[in-house]
Amino acid sequence: MSKIQKSVMQRFFRDAAGDATRLPWHSEEPPPFLARAVDARALARDGGGRALDVGCGSGHFAACMAELGLAVTAIDYIPDAVAMARETCRRRGVAVDVVEADALEYRPDEPFDLVFDSGCLHNMSGAELAAYRRRLAHWLAPGGDYLLGHWGRRHFLDWRPIGPRRRRPEEIERIVGPDVELVDFSEVDERVPLPFGPWVRMASYWFRRGTPPN
């Protein structure tokens, strides 16, 4: 993420003054595929599932994962976002470990059963993408699920000089690498405020990491 992008993101959270509804991308809808991924792998059974929310923002999705029974760690590099996420989880009555950390530098002691990213990868480009892939390989346990929300590219001219990158599905699969396989995919076009809108293609990906041979 460039310095300009970081400055813009910091301003959004500062201007929101703790009110997540003032963020242009705010949504409290459960992330696509999340409940299915938890059910399919029984991650929350007996409290055994660990999840990582990368770039947690306001914390609503981290809280949603905690409500499904996962032990959640949420990271964000913006102090105002970290404060907002902690307040969100407190208000919803769930325990989430919210950590101020840069995604490309975050190294947990052990991998996670589920990694969720809705808004981090699509702010990266260049060498950051390779670094992100290396981090993902470290974060995600064998057989674990990786859920990604990323803005899709509707046509050749669908881009903005600032804000998240818009990428086609084949680009996403190249970025995340061959260690994960696509389980499911969906996309929908939605109206969003300027400067990001008026239209954005919201793409959701469900990947799963293979298990090593015995």
Image (cartoon, rainbow, N blue to C red):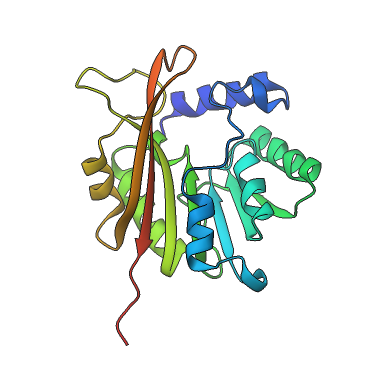
Q: In this rendering, would 25 be left or right of 85?
A: left
Q: Quadrant of residue 61?
A: top right
Name above or below for residue 133 compared with residue 81.
below
Is residue 167 something that shows in the picture?
Answer: yes
Residue at point 79%, 45% (across, down): 90
Residue at point 34%, 18% (across, down): 160
**Whole-percent x, y for residue 78 in the image:** 60, 36
Name above or below for residue 20 compared with residue 66.
above
Is residue 107 something that shows in the picture?
Answer: no
Q: Quadrant of residue 73?
A: bottom right
Q: Quadrant of residue 210?
A: bottom left
Residue at point 66%, 69% (across, down): 47
Name above or below for residue 139 compared with residue 104.
below
**Whole-percent x, y for residue 181 in the image:** 29, 59
Along the line of sight, the residue nearer the viewer: 115 or 185: 185
**Whole-percent x, y for residue 179 in the image:** 29, 63
Along the line of sight, the residue nearer the viewer: 37 or 143: 37
Tell me the quadrant of the picture where the C terminus can be found.
Answer: bottom left
User: Total label count?
Assistant: 0
Tell me the quadrant of the picture where the N terminus can be found.
Answer: top left
Q: In this rendering, would 122 be left or right of 23?
A: left
**Whole-percent x, y for residue 107 in the image:** 51, 61
Seen as rendered, the residue at the extreme bottom is: 214
Along the line of sight, the residue nearer the viewer: 45 or 173: 45
